[in-house]
Amino acid sequence: MSGAVSSENPEGLAFPREFVIGSATASYQIEGAADEGGRTPSIWDTFSRTPGRTWNGDTGDVACDHYHRLESDLDLMASLGLEAYRFSLSWSRLLPGAGDRPNPAGVDFYSRLVDGLLARGIRPIATLYHWDLPQELEDAGGWTNRDTALRFADYAGHAVDALGDRVHTWTTLNEPWCSAYLGYGSGAHAPGRTDGAAALAAVHHLNLAHGLAVPEIRRRATNTPDVSATLNFHVIRGGDAEATRRIDALANRAFTSPMLLGRYDDDLIADTAAVTDWSFVRDGDLALVHQPIDVLGVNYYSTVTVAMWDGASERSRNDGHKDVGGTPWPGSEHVEFLPQAGPYTDMGWNIAPDGLEELLVSLGEQFPGQPLMITENGAAFADVVTPTPDGPRVHDVERVDYLRRHFAAARRAMDRGVDLRGYLVWSLLDNFEWGYGYSKRFGIVRVDYDTRERLVKDSGRWLAGLLASRA
C-alpha cells in the first residue's frame, strides 16, 4: 500500500446485536488434503498443477491444511468471537468424480465442521460453489454445457441431505462473474479458456444452476434455512456513460437481472451479438433462474474507472485482474480501464470505502425489499512478523484501517435505509490466492506456509474487539 493511513475516525459507530459479524474462506484455498478422504481433482487442481498458470507454481494441495486442523481452527474462530463463518464445500470431496453417491469421508468432514461451529455458537453459512468444479464435468464441457447446471442441482440436493438440518444459510454460487469471465474468457482462472462465447454461455448456465438449486435446497432442508447467492459487484466510475453502461451490463446486470428480475437486459444481448446469439437460453429458463432469495451476498474490494478506447493509443487494462491474453469483457473489448488514484492494497486495488457505501445504497434502490449481506470484504498487504516481549505479532495497521473504514461505510449505508444484515471479513486465514498462489495475504490470521502455524494479526484482534463492543 502507498500513502498514509487514513485519519478518519469512525469509532463509535454502533452495530445492532442482530447484525451478524464474521469471516469467510473457501474450500480449495484452505483445506489441502487434495488427494485424501476420497476427494478427486477439481479444475483448480488441474489448473494450478499446470506449469505457468500460478505464481511460483503454487497449488492448493496442502494450502492451510485446514482438513487436518479443523478442531484447532474452530477453536481459533471461537477465540475471535465470530458470530458467523462462511465456508464452501468441495464438490469433489462430497461427490467424488462428480458422481451421485455421497462420499462418507467428505460428509463426515463437513458434518464435523458444521457441528463444531454450532457447538461454539457460530452460524454456519455454506457456499455450494466457490469455483472448484469437478474436473470430470469440465472434461464434458464445464459451464459451457447445460448439463452442468442440472448436475449442480443434484449436488445441491445431496449437500442439503447431508447438512440441511443444521446449516443456517445456503449460498448457491460465489462470484459467478469470476467463474464465467475469468475462467472461460480471460484464461486467468481455471479452467483457463479464452473464448468469449464460452464465457457468455457459462454466465447463463451458472445463472440456471442457481435457479435450479434454490428450490432443491428449500425442498430438502429440514430447518428453513436462508438461501442466497453471492455476487462480486463492479462499482464503476469515470463519467463515460457508454463505457459505464457496457461494463455494468456485463459485470453486474448479467447476474442481477436474471436472478432478481427474470430477464437478460436488451443492451447486454445487443452488446454481445457479435460474440454469441444467446441460443443457449431456452424457453422457460429465465423463470427457472428467477427464484426468491432471502439475502443477496455482496462482495466488494475496490472500484473501476472506465472510458471508451480511442483505438489508437495503448489500451489501458487496469481492471484489477491478471492479464494472460484473453479478455473478461466479451463484446466490450473497446472499453478501457483507467488507472485509479491510491492508496492501494498489495493486489494493486485502490482503497475506496465510499464505493462500498455507494454500492449498498444503489442495490437497496434497485432491489427494494431485498436484504443484503457483505459476504466478502478485506485486503491483502505485505505483512511483517515482529518479535515482541509477549511473542510474535503482525502489526497490520493498514488492514485495520481498511476494515475500520469499510465497516464505517457499511454503517453509513444502514443509516441511509439499506437493509444490511451482516458483514463477513475476507479472509479468516492467509490462503491460496488463486493465480497469485501464496504471494498475497488477505487473512486476519497469519499462516506460516512452512509450519502451517496460525498467528492472529492485529486486524484479527481488532475484529474481536468490534465483536465484543459492537462499535
Image: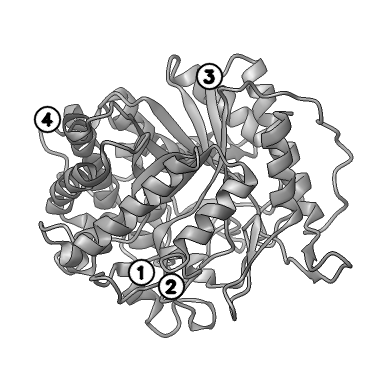
Do tag 4 and tag 1 residues touch (Cβ < 8 Å)? Answer: no
Task: Identify the mark at residue 44; answer none if there is no mark.
Answer: 1
Q: Which of the image's four quarters has the N terminus?
A: bottom right
Q: Which residue is mark 3?
A: 419
The crowding category of the residue bearing disc 2, from other C-alpha atoms within 10 Å (few below 14, some 14 to 19, many at least 20), is many
Which three-letter amino acid code belongs to the residue tagged 3? Asp
SS assignment at label 1:
helix
Asked if residue 44 is positioned above or below residue 466 in the image, the reply reads below
Q: Disc 4 and disc 1: Cα gap in Å? A: 32 Å
Q: Position of residue 333 (x, y in %)?
A: 45, 54
Do tag 2 and tag 3 residues touch (Cβ < 8 Å)? Answer: no
Q: Position of residue 259 (x, y in %)?
A: 31, 31
The crowding category of the residue bearing disc 1, from other C-alpha atoms within 10 Å (few below 14, some 14 to 19, many at least 20), is many
**Could you tell which of marks 2 and 4 lies nearer the N-terminus?**
2
Q: Which residue is mark 2?
A: 60
Q: Disc 1 and disc 2: Cα gap in Å? A: 8 Å
**Could you tell which of marks 2 and 3 lies nearer the N-terminus?**
2
Q: Which residue is mark 4?
A: 284
Q: Disc 3 and disc 4: Cα gap in Å? A: 31 Å
Asked if residue 148 is positioned above or below residue 387 in the image, the reply reads above
Which mark's residue is nearer the viewer, 3 or 4?
Answer: 3
SS assignment at label 2:
loop
Which mark's residue is nearer the viewer, 4 or 1?
Answer: 1
**Could you tell which of marks 4 and 1 lies nearer the N-terminus?**
1
Which three-letter amino acid code belongs to the residue tagged 4? Gly
Q: Disc 3 and disc 1: Cα gap in Å? A: 35 Å
Which three-letter amino acid code belongs to the residue tagged 2? Gly
